[in-house]
Structure formats: structure tokens, C-alpha cells
Image (spheres, rainbow, N blue to C red):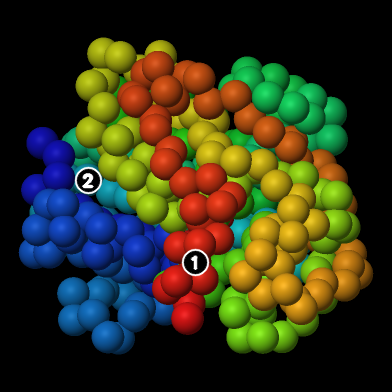
Amino acid sequence: MTFEKILVTGAAGQIGSELVPFLSDHFGSSRVIPSDVRPNTNDPRFISLDVTDKGAVEKAIDKYRIDTIFHLAAILSANGEKNPELAFKVNVVGLYNIFEVAVSNKIGLVMTPSSIGVFGPDTPKENVPIETITRPVTMYGVTKLLAETLGYYYHSRFGLNARGLRFPGLISYKNPPGGGTTDYSIEMIVEAVKGRSYKCFLREDSKLPMMYMPDALDSLLRLAEADDSRLKHRTDFNVTSFSITPKELEMELREYYPSFRVTYQPDFRQAIADSWPASLDSSAAINEWGFHPRYDLKSTTADMIAHLK
Ligand SMILES: NC(=O)c1ccc[n+]([C@@H]2O[C@H](COP(=O)([O-])OP(=O)(O)OC[C@H]3O[C@@H](n4cnc5c(N)ncnc54)[C@H](O)[C@@H]3O)[C@@H](O)[C@H]2O)c1
């Protein structure tokens, strides 16, 4: 059984804060149990849950009769490099706890977003397929690659319906980003709308794949509802909408704010960006579950500005 009671972990984060209302609209708000180690106190449905505490995960799943999990709790790339031990604990031990409890409680579906962080400097740069060289150089990437592999393992060994996709940088306006390498895109748009200049922590020519949040939410739902018999992959679908450099975003913002200026002062995040591909091949997601992004750079920027104003 799936979608009768849905636990969302890490629900107070950038994706979770939008996925919770999205799932609530789709399935009904009483079916969604948002949880986080730092719960959102504005939503009475929220429960406090630390995914590194297996006993607490077990209790929550039992108490709320959970049959579906969207597992978003994680430490992202830039924050993970600042605290690799915590990244390992949350991203690996937390996921292991979720998978273990999911198997023993016969959970129908576990969604585990992955990331372009699984790629590394030896990965080709353009139109990268799912199966390629994955040798990440961040703790975040290492944990995400392990998470994908663990998903395949739990599926083949225990029949667990684990599914996931490799998100590129996600652009959104509702909640601040969670310490990733593509956060510059959101920060740049926010500063332009405020009429300020922006100091970018990546080089102006760092091309990276991106996606607007509505497409990310739509893709999570499409994959979650996909017919299992059509899936040849499970936890590592490449998805992408468009690829941009910081300079291209700056020029797009100048269409709205002609005096907007960006200075480029790369920091430690440049090395992370340099290790990631510029574009991805998402044909498996298109063929196996109908991935269909609608936003490009122009429509993303226009919609972000309209909402931030
Ligand atoms: N945002 C992006 O650009 C992006 C890109 C690729 C992949 N992803 C993946 O999507 C998922 C969600 O990312 P996000 O952007 O919402 O991240 P985020 O950092 O905004 O949110 C993560 C949430 O997890 C919570 N958390 C941290 N430790 C926890 C713990 N021990 N127990 C429970 N909750 C804990 C945090 O409080 C936070 O609210 C992650 O798996 C991430 O790797 C995100």
C-alpha cells in the first residue's frame, strides 16, 4: 500500500517546505506527516524526528502507520565539506535507518533524492549518461553515491521499492537553500530583486545543470507514481531542465534590472562546481516515467522575480 500515510523527513528544508504543501494538495493534508530535526513550528502536523536515531524512526513509522517515505533529510555539498562527519552520519546512517525500518515495516515506497554530486572530475562534462564514471570528490557526493547503491541493494535483496533521481541545482524562492554549491543562483536573483549588487562565489563561466522547484516537485511525484514494470533504473535517474553559467543568469537579470552588477570571487565551492558535469542526459527519466520539465532559464527567472517582488 502506498500514499495512505506519507512521512517526509527533512521537511523543513528547501525541497521539503514545498513538497509538503504539494503532496498535501495532491493526496490530502491529513495523509502527510512532515518531520525534521528542526521542525517547522508553523505547521501543527510537524513532528520532531532525527533520522540518525533508528529507534525514533521506528516509533514514528509505527505511530503514524506510515506506508510511504519521502526521505529528504540530508547535509548538502558545501555544508558537508565543512562538516564531513555530520554529512556521513545524516546521509548514510540516516538513510540506512530509513531503509532498515522500511523493510521491517513493509513500507510500500521510499523516495530518496540523489544529486549531481555523485559525479566527479573524471566524469565527462556534457550530456552525461546515468552509467558513467562516478568518482566524487566531496563527502556529500560519496554519501549520495552510496545512497543510490544502497537503494539498488535493498531493492534486489529485500524487494524494497526504493526510487530516486539525481537533482541538479534547484532554484526556488519559498525557503532559503540549504548550503549547496548552486545556491548562488537563488542568492543572485534575490539580490537583483532587492536592487543590490551580488558577489558570486563561483567563476562566471561555471556551467552547471539547474531546475526550477515546480519541475522538481512534479518529477518527484511522477517517479513516485510510475508503473514499477517500466522502471529499468531505480535510485539514480538523471534529471535536468537547463544548464547555465553565473554570467548567463546575470545577463538574464539585467533584462529586468539594467544596473544590476555581479563581481566574481570564487571560494572553496569552485572546486566542487568544477568537479560536476555541465549537462546531463535525462532520457531514461523521460522514457521510464515521463519526466517532463517545463521551465527554462527565461521562465524560471520571470517566475522567481514575480514571486520575490
Ligand atoms: N536543493 C538542491 O539544490 C538539491 C540538489 C540535489 C539534491 N538535493 C537533495 O534533495 C534532498 C533535500 O535537499 P534540500 O535542498 O531540501 O536540503 P536542505 O538542507 O534545505 O534540507 C534538509 C533538511 O534536513 C534536515 N536535517 C538535517 N539533519 C537531519 C537529521 N539528522 N534528521 C532529520 N532531519 C535532518 C535539516 O534540518 C533540513 O531542514 C537531499 O537529499 C539533497 O541531497 C537537493
Q: Which of the pair 254/100 is nearer the observer?
A: 254
Amino acid at circle 2? Thr
Q: Are marks 2 and 1 in contact (CB under 8 Å)?
A: no
Res. 294 image quadrant: top left
Q: Residue at x 84, y 45 (%)?
A: 274
Q: In the displayed structure, does residue 269 sit left or right of residue 279?
A: right
Q: Which residue is mark 1?
A: 304
Image location (x, y in percent) of residue 108: 20, 36
Q: In the displayed structure, does residue 242 sit left or right of residue 239?
A: right
- Circle on res. 68: 2
Q: Residue at x 30, y 86 (%)?
A: 41
Image location (x, y in percent) of residue 110: 32, 41
Say above or below: 2 vs 152. below
Q: Which of the pair 136/248 is nearer the observer?
A: 248
Where, quadrant-wise, is the N terminus in this rendering? top left
Instruction: Indicate yes or no: mark 1 CB to ligand 1 under 8 Å.
Output: no
Q: Which of the pair 90/112 is nearer the observer?
A: 112
Report, in whole angstroms, how far the alpha carbon at label 2 lies from the one at label 1.
31 Å
Q: Is residue 122 visible?
A: yes
Amino acid at circle 1? Met
Image location (x, y in percent) of residue 11: 36, 65
Image location (x, y in percent) of residue 22: 25, 58
Q: Which of the pair 48/241 is nearer the observer?
A: 241
